[in-house]
Image (spheres, grey):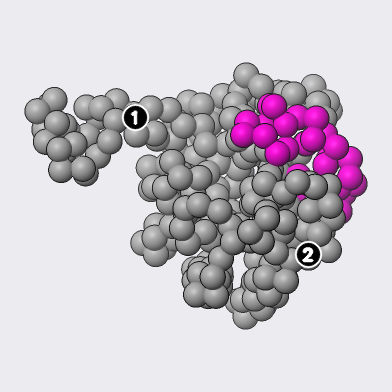
C-alpha cells in the first residue's frame, strides 16, 4: 500500500513527511483542486526524503487547454525533471470532457524525453480529469494505451466513497496494467473500504481548518489582514495527526493481510 498526500505549502510538505506519507503530490491552491506549485516550493521539495510528484495544472476550471497553456504544462514537466522530482501529474480533455488523447500523447512523450535527459524516468499520473469522462472504463483503457503509470480518480463522484463501485470496476479492468490511485475525501475512517476492493494506492489531503489566530497576534490583526484580502476564513492545512492516523490504518490492514 502507498499513501500519497497532496500539499500546497512547505508546512504541508513537512507534515506529510513526518506523518509517514510514502509520496507527495506537490500543488498550489488545493482549495481550487490544485494548481502548479511555485518554483521555490518545487526547489524545497526536491530534497524531500520521499518521492514528490508535481501537479502541472496552469489554472482553475476545466482541462481543455489552449496551445499557450499546453506550452506552460510542458514547461512545468521540464521543471519537475530538472529539479529531480520523481513524477508529474497531468491531464487534458476536449470540451465534451473526453480525454484529449492527442494532447496527452504529446505531453507523455515530452515527459518521457525529459526523464531520459536527466537519466531517471518521470512517473506519470493522469489526474482527476478522468472523473469528468462519461465513459470511465474507456478512458482508463486510453490512459493505459498512452503509457500512464497510474490514474488518480474518485470513481466519477465528488467523493471517492460514493464512487466505490466504479473504483472497484476500474481496479478489475486495470488488471495490473496501471495503478488505480483512489482519492477525494479518504481518511482513516473509510480507507478500509477501498482496500477491500483491491485499491493499493491512496491519495488524501488530510486537511483540517487552521485556527484563525494561529499566525497573527490577535483578533484585531486578523481582521486587518482580512480587510486587505490577504487571508480568508477557513484556511486548510495538512494535519500531521490525520496523516499518521491514515497511515496507521493502512499499516494495520497490511499486517492483517500478511
Magenta stretch: give its range.
155-180
Q: Which residue does the image show at 62% across and 19% down from the upper left?
A: 189
Residue 175 part of the magenta-drawn span = yes
Q: Quadrant of the N terminus?
A: top right
Which comes before the other along the chain, label 1 or label 2? 2
Q: Is residue 120 left or right of residue 168?
A: left
Residue 167 location, x and y as percent?
A: 78, 36
Q: Is residue 172 left or right of residue 98?
A: right
Taking the view exactly as shown, the residue that stands out farthest to the front is 96
Rendered view: 129 above or below 117: above
Q: Is residue 47 left or right of residue 230?
A: right
Near-viewer residue (29 or 120): 29
Q: Quadrant of the C terminus?
A: top right
Residue 206 part of the magenta-drawn span = no
The residue indicated by pointer 1 is 234
Q: Secondary structure at mark 2?
A: loop
Q: Which residue does the image show at 69% across and 27% down from the upper left?
A: 162
Rendered view: 132 above or below 146: above
Residue 67: which quarter of the image?
bottom right
The residue indicated by pointer 2 is 147
Near-viewer residue (186 or 139): 139
Q: Secondary structure at mark 1?
A: loop
Q: Is residue 56 visible?
A: yes
Q: Which residue does the image show at 72% across and 71% down from the upper left?
A: 102
Distance in Å between CA atoms under marks 1 and 2: 39 Å
* Crowd class of label 2 (few under 14; some 14 to 19; many from 20; radius 10 Å): some
Amino acid at each position: 500500500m502507498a499513501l500519497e498526500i497532496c500539499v500546497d505549502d512547505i508546512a504541508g510538505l513537512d507534515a506529510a513527511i513526518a506523518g509517514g506519507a510514502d509520496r507527495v503530490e506537490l500543488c498550489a491552491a488545493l482549495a481550487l483542486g490544485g494548481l502548479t506549485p511555485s518554483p521555490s516550493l518545487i526547489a524545497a521539495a526536491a530534497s524531500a526524503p520521499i518521492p514528490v510528484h508535481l501537479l502541472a495544472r496552469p489554472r482553475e476550471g476545466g482541462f481543455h487547454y489552449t496551445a499557450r497553456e499546453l506550452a506552460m504544462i510542458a514547461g512545468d514537466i521540464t521543471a519537475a525533471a530538472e529539479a529531480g522530482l520523481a513524477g508529474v501529474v497531468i491531464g487534458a480533455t476536449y470540451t465534451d470532457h473526453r480525454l484529449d488523447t492527442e494532447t496527452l500523447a504529446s505531453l507523455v512523450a515530452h515527459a518521457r524525453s525529459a526523464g531520459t535527459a536527466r537519466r531517471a524516468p518521470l512517473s506519470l499520473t493522469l489526474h482527476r480529469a478522468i472523473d469528468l469522462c462519461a465513459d470511465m472504463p474507456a478512458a482508463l483503457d486510453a490512459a493505459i494505451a498512452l503509457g500512464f503509470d497510474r490514474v488518480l480518480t474518485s470513481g466519477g463522484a465528488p467523493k471517492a466513497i460514493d464512487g466505490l463501485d466504479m473504483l472497484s470496476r476500474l481496479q478489475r479492468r486495470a488488471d495490473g496494467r496501471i495503478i488505480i490511485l483512489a482519492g477525494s475525501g479518504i481518511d482513516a475512517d473509510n480507507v478500509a473500504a477501498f482496500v477491500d476492493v483491491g485499491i493499493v494506492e491512496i491519495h488524501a489531503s488530510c486537511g483540517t481548518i487552521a485556527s484563525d489566530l494561529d499566525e497573527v497576534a490577535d483578533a484585531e490583526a486578523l481582521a486587518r489582514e482580512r480587510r486587505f484580502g490577504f487571508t480568508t476564513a477557513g484556511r486548510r492545512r495538512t494535519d500531521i495527526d490525520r496523516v499518521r492516523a491514515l497511515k496507521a490504518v493502512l499499516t494495520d490492514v497490511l499486517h492483517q493481510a500478511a
